[in-house]
Amino acid sequence: MATMKDVAEAAKVSVITVSRVINMPDKVKPATRYKVEQEMKALGFTPNIAAKNLVSRRTGIIDVYIPESIDLSNPFAMHFITGISEVLSKQMYSFLILRNRTHKHLCDGYIITGLLKDEIDDFYRYALENKRPIVLFGHTELLSVNCIDVNNVTGASMAVDHLINLGHKKIAMINVDEDKDYTIDRLAGYHKAFKDNGLPIPGNSVINAINNTNGGYEATLRLLKEEKFSAIFCATDTIALGAIRAARDLGKEIPKDLSIVGFDGLGHQLLANPVITTVQQPVFRIGSMLAELLLDQINGDECSIKKLVEPELLDGNSTAVIRE
Amino acid sequence: MATMKDVAEAAKVSVITVSRVINMPDKVKPATRYKVEQEMKALGFTPNIAAKNLVSRRTGIIDVYIPESIDLSNPFAMHFITGISEVLSKQMYSFLILRNRTHKHLCDGYIITGLLKDEIDDFYRYALENKRPIVLFGHTELLSVNCIDVNNVTGASMAVDHLINLGHKKIAMINVDEDKDYTIDRLAGYHKAFKDNGLPIPGNSVINAINNTNGGYEATLRLLKEEKFSAIFCATDTIALGAIRAARDLGKEIPKDLSIVGFDGLGHQLLANPVITTVQQPVFRIGSMLAELLLDQINGDECSIKKLVEPELLDGNSTAVIRE
DNA sequence: AACGAAAATGGTAACGCTATCATTCTTGTT
DNA sequence: AACAAGAATGATAGCGTTACCATTTTCGTT
């Protein structure tokens, strides 16, 4: 493997000039630069990342924390990771997907997602100690943690708006049974839609469930036993899946007898029946934005960004105009 | 950040002894080892990977080549990557997903997938030059390339067997229009099933298609125009999706009028109707096996392994007993 | 107690790169 | 032609680890 020394000898310059051709080409006279570049090509020179990292005190690795509760095999997670990967690999960074917080490891920065408030605080302290920047998919008030989140409030309100526009008034919500920002915000969006449309916020219409298909299934059974709802807004697509199964088991046809909207945009609904109407999070874009933000921070940009991106309503066929 | 020197001073030993505690603990007297370990904990010492890599001439990075033609967002790809990630991160290796072959980059080894025969040859030459091991998801006769592949022959024959057992005799196949090992093998498996069941291999029953839903759609229209088939074996689930749409557009009910089997196991068919009967590849396991094999090779094991893993038939409801 | 072999430990030089400061070469101005 | 100021280049040290060889310690044997 050719080193800078080899290139330097071949081009009859010093190693440091070769280094400059790579890192600050403007500082090298065009003629010298050309000669060096020719020799680099001829020798098939590739810089040794380990050496570079050693001297610049970097590892070249970004830790991506995704808790085990998030299924990596769903397209939602994958798009996110692909977005990150796209940006990082261009900058010769590589990344490690870590599944639990105890797996501590030296890296240049963290992309974290899906953690609870106090977990983020822990992380923040740990990262501050090591002077490593953090970016977060989500939201926190902690300084020097750049965040990007989907606007869960407007997202949820779009979903419920859609139902209201179809004539629904008795709209229930199945929320996720966890104290996270997104659950609070989606609930707020649910309320907002009623308010925006000049409707009273219904009582006894929100029920909590564990975020899996079973949770959605059972919540729906409970929900439809007591009150008569014509539509359900599910805080996640996974819950919506369970809701649809439960409704069918109760003999209801979807969307004729019951409209259902989800949230997330799991994708791959190719042969699904019904295709769930859902609020899609642009996770690919969020992943790449977070990676860019993190690299900026690593390179010394002291910006503090708390950004919300707007999701999009994907109309499927799990919703219909209410029957009179 | 604490270095070995700090630990050495604190424990009143030399740096090299600290190094030995980490890399060859047996060579250090228990009392010394204990003292060093205590100090490592107290100082929160983590070895500097860059320095380790520099001196041991490694990069700590594995390049994973997945051609752009493979959609990273499908669960199939994701399980594969997760399998790789699981193994590598335990050994403090990290990985880069590369999407085209021109993106050449120094690494400790390659995991490659989805390449054509001559592309593998190219790769092989390049990797040999750099003395970097390769493992392949697929098959090749090249020495020192360890391969793991799904047994596409038995997989395809399982699928067709299943149809034959349901009473089907006029079984068509839609194969992928590419000259890859898996297409050849799945075709061979199709033939094998007839032979195993003592049936004659039908003529004019195999048609090629581009590997996407449109390809499957159009191939099915062509197929059903001429001959009367009661079942179709699709070489991929993606083609099967298109086939189902085409059949429906021709007014056929599935599985009543036409049985369809796919191959791959894309997953996430939660609300799908029908759920495609398919041959599932254990991609997670293949990913982790490949990663382990590669690490073994990097550590000097000169083993040559060409292994086939057996896929599994997942029964959905896109197949039914033939109507008389 | 003296000796030798084996175990345990240490000193020093790399690994390939960049930072820092020093030196040489250009160029424009008087 | 002389000079200053800036551009271009170079010499050297050091990043944190391991490899190699040298030295010291330990322990059983005579």
Image: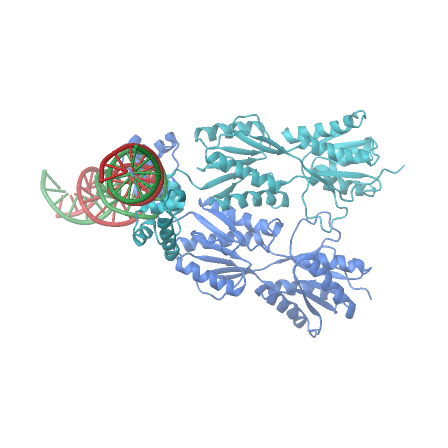
Chain colours: A cyan, B blue, C green, D red
Q: Position of residue B164 (x, y in %)?
A: 72, 66
Tell me: residue A232, above or below residue B241. Answer: above
Q: Nearer the viewer, residue B280 or B47?
A: B47
Say left or right for B54 vs A115: left
Q: Nearer the viewer, residue A318 or B19?
A: A318
Count the labels in the image.
0
Q: Which of B292 and A64 is in front in this view?
A: A64
Q: Where is residue A267 in the image (x, y as percent from the top left)?
A: 68, 46
Q: In which quarter of the image is the N terminus of chain A?
A: bottom left
Q: Where is residue B17 in the image (x, y as percent from the top left)?
A: 29, 39
Residue at 41% in and 53% down: B298
* Visible residue check, residue B88: yes
Tell me: residue A40, above or below residue A169. Answer: below
Say left or right for B84 vs A269: left
Q: Where is residue A312 in the image (x, y as percent from the top left)?
A: 70, 39
Q: Which of B274 and A89 is in front in this view?
A: A89
* Visible residue check, residue B166: no
Q: In which quarter of the image is the C terminus of chain A?
A: top right
Quadrant in the rendering for residue B34: top left
- Residue reaching furthest to the right: A324
Residue at 80% in and 28% down: A197
